[in-house]
Image (spheres, helix red, strand yellow):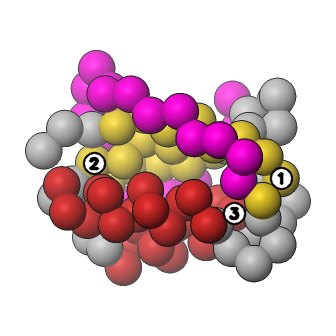
Amino acid sequence: MAARLLRIEGRVQGVGYRDWMIREANRLGLHGWVRNRPDGSVQALVDGDEGAVRTLLTACRRGPALARVDRIEERLAADPPAEPGFHRRGNG
């Protein structure tokens, strides 16, 4: 397992993207967090079973009904999430 840090760009704020991602990640048994960024993107740290992470990444390209995902940057994270479960983090 290798934690991934994601930056999701497009129309991803104000459309329920974070709540949707929390539900999907919890359904898949993943750990990490999601938050809005000041530049209008969404950032997430995702960790867990490799197959489940890939499933979430595929779903993130679609997002919830009102979202439009233009681009996802993905890179390996230096550290895994500090807490179990998947939750919303304060904006940053």
Q: Quadrant of the C terminus?
A: top right
Q: Residue at x 18, y 55 (%)?
A: 50
Asked if the residue at tag 3 contacts the one at tag 2, i.e. Cβ–Cβ closer than 8 Å, the answer is no
Is 58 in the magenta?
A: no
Which numbered disc covers residue 47?
A: 2
Which numbered disc covers residue 17?
A: 3
Kind of residue indicated by mark 1: Arg
Kind of residue indicated by mark 3: Tyr
Q: Position of residue 12 (x, y in %)?
A: 77, 54
- Residue 72 occupies quadrant: top right
Is 74 in the magenta?
A: yes
Which numbered disc covers residue 90?
A: none
Q: Secondary structure at mark 3?
A: helix
Q: Position of residue 64 (x, y in %)?
A: 68, 73
Span shown in magenta: 69-92
Q: CA distance from mark 2 to mark 3?
A: 18 Å
In front of the other: 31 or 54: 54
In front of the other: 66 or 36: 66
Q: Secondary structure at mark 2?
A: strand
Q: Which residue is mark 1?
A: 11
Q: CA distance from mark 1 to mark 2?
A: 24 Å
Q: Residue at x 46, y 73 (%)?
A: 24
> From this viewpoint, is residue 36 visible?
no
